[in-house]
Amino acid sequence: MFGLPQHDLDQQPQSVQIPENATVQIENPRGDVSITSGDSANIEVQAHQVAFAGSDEEAKKIFNSEQARVTVSGSAVLVKSDGNNNGRVNLTVTVPKSAHVAVHSGHGDVTAANLNGGVNINSTHGDVHLSVIKGSVQIHFSNDRGDFSAHQVDGDITAEGNCNDLT
């Protein structure tokens, strides 16, 4: 990534109807994840892709390899980007208020706000910021490079692993 030009692409927004009380799993190995709730029964995913490549053709290959997808199987919903070592995908996800959210983030920050179904986050490298969460919160940190902040959580918080600052 060092020394290569940066290419940006906003993926076409995705809106998919999901069952009430669905479990939404978000997997993003490289990039930030921002989650909030909306008044709709749909999950809405916006993805901003970044590629570091020497040409537009190389960037297009990276964009294709890391493109975010939404898959619904019964009450399970998967939002997944495969990631690429020469790129990242920043996801903005809006879920129905009743959805339970689970996030696996590799390299990137996780922000979640206004969720009513609780949240489970596994963060490898990055900060985690939570605000106005109803339900239980489980956080697992894989290393000590990230910060954790939680405000207005109406439920139990279970956090394990090492992190830098804790608020």
Image: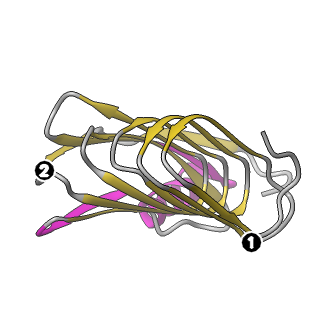
Residue type, numbered disc 1? Ser
Q: Which residue is mark 1?
A: 142
Bin the neighbour count of mark 2 within 10 Å (Cα to Cα): few under 14, some 14-19, many 20 and up: few
Residue 62 image position (x, y, % from top left): 53, 61
Which quadrant, please, contains the C terminus? top right
Does 65 appear in magenta?
yes
Residue 140, magenta (yes or no)? no
Residue shown at the point (77%, 51%) measured from the top left: 4
Q: Is residue 111 left or right of residue 19?
A: right
Which quadrant would residue 124 be assigned to in this image?
Answer: bottom right
The answer to which of marks 2 and 1 sits earlier in the sequence is: 2
What span is in magenta? 47-74
Q: Quadrant of residue 130?
A: top right
Q: Residue at x 48, y 47 (%)?
A: 155
Residue type (three-letter) at the residue carrying disc 2: Glu
Instruction: Identify which residue is drawn at 53% across, 39% down.
Output: 153
Which color scheme is applied?
A: secondary structure
- The secondary element bearing badge 1 is classed as loop
Left or right of 33 in this view: 129:
right
Relative vertical location of residue 132 with respect to residue 139 in this rendering, above or below: above
Q: Nearer the viewer, residue 129 or 67?
A: 129
Q: Secondary structure at mark 2?
A: loop
114 to 142, vertically: above or below: above
**Depth-wise, is mark 2 or mark 1 nearer the camera?**
2
- The spot of residue 7 in percent (x, y) is 61, 42
Query: Where's residue 28, x and y in %?
Result: 52, 61
- Mark-to-mark CA distance, 2 and 1: 32 Å
Say few, some or many: other residues with alpha carbon within 10 Å of mark 1 (under 14 / 14 to 19 / 20 or more): some
Residue named by callout 2: 20
